[in-house]
Image: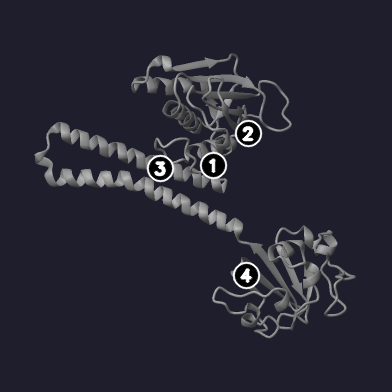
Amino acid sequence: MSVGTSSAPGAREVRRPSTSRPGDPAELGIDPDDLPDGLVVADEHGHVICFNAAAERITAVPAADALGQRLEKALPLEDLEGRRWWQVTDPYGGLAIRRRQPERNLLLPGGREVLVSVRYVRAEPTGPVRRVVVSLRDTEARRRTERSHAELIATVAHELRSPLTSVKGFTATLLAKWERFTDDQKRLMLETVDADADRVTRLIAELLDISRIDSGRLEVRRQPVDIGAAVGRHIQAYVAAGQPADRFLLRVEQPLPDLWADPDKIDQVLSNLIENAVRHGDGTVTIDITATTSPREGEDRENTATSVTVSDEGPGIPEESMNRVFTRFWRGSKRGGTGLGLYIVKGIVEAHGGAIEVGRAPGGGAQFRFTLPVAAPAYLT
């Protein structure tokens, strides 16, 4: 299907113009059916001369039925107040200085919503309209994005409400009745306020990470990282907090390649994965660090990446849930958490050029394995 002019209002065959300018679709060999958005073009008489495949899909109108029809009949759009769009805008009889209609939500017959933008093509700045070019987009992708944002806002509001209520309650009580409490009671209240403030800070940090991941602005500041020592620090912190030392098993294969990564972000990945294993798993938490091949395509050298596997001996993750583990708000259990941690982990690993996967551990529990390429900074390569 090609953009051109029809010989009669009822014509079904659409031909390209015999001449073309450099850069136009005819010169570039672009077929309207290759365009991702719906494209509808009407000639100077208001008859449809182009109705591409995407327009067919969005409107459920066959191109053969639309070509040659009046634009308002082939594409009977209404605004959200029920007014007929082409009568309201009057593309051929409106202001001579109009060049376009900005994108807006309109309704197809049956109430289906579409995003529509219009361009008026004139041979001269204030001359008559020679072409009306209509772009159609399905709203479903935008709706999914809006739903995702709404879910994020609802989750954040819910997660913030509890600690902030606690902080407000305890501080208000202490200020009003300071002399009535013992030192031990005051200490308990202040420790609770401190813990809740840490929770709020952690949530805000997660939101900032999600924003950077979604916008592609997550910065990675590479430095030499001793991944074995980093895991060891996390284990020591859990032991100091009361976990038995024999609950953790760290196995480091030597030699390991020199790893250049962002130490703070790698600590964030390790913290999330080990915490998940401790909180949601049972038995021994095993961390294996090995040299492996790079996850990057086309890289065939051996020992060019570091692999870290964290596994536990708990109930594991159901098979039907494994494809949702790294999505927003997924929770493996009802033991708290925002459901954002693994989404952030995946974003951090991929920002390093790595890959992460989930599976079942040999002991039956959950197993997370991420691989990071050596990736020395550009100034050292």
Q: Quadrant of residue 358?
A: top right
Label 1 SS: loop
Give the residue type at disc 4: Gly
In the rendered image, which residue does mark 4 sit on?
110
Q: Nearer the viewer, mark 1 or mark 2?
A: 1
Q: CA distance from mark 3 to mark 2?
A: 33 Å
In the rendered image, which residue does mark 3 sit on?
203
Query: Is residue 265 shown left or right of residue 49?
Result: left
Q: Residue furthest bottom?
A: 93
Sooner in the amino-acid sequence: mark 4 or mark 3: 4
Q: Nearer the viewer, mark 2 or mark 4?
A: 4
Query: Is residue 71 shown left or right of residue 338?
Result: right
Disc sitting over residue 378 in the figure: 2
Label 2 SS: helix
Q: Residues within 10 Å of mark 1 (few under 14, many from 20)?
A: some
Sooner in the amino-acid sequence: mark 4 or mark 1: 4
Give the residue type at disc 1: Thr
Query: Is residue 204 shown left or right of residue 117?
Result: left
Give the residue type at disc 2: Ala
Q: Quadrant of residue 350?
A: top right
User: Residue 159 placed where, x, y %?
Assistant: 38, 45
Q: Nearer the viewer, mark 4 or mark 1?
A: 4
Q: Residues within 10 Å of mark 2 (few under 14, many from 20)?
A: few
Sooner in the amino-acid sequence: mark 2 or mark 4: 4
Residue at position x 66%, y 84% in the image: 94
Label 3 SS: helix
Sooner in the amino-acid sequence: mark 3 or mark 1: 3
Q: CA distance from mark 3 to mark 1?
A: 17 Å
In this rendering, the answer to whether 200 lies above or below 314 is below
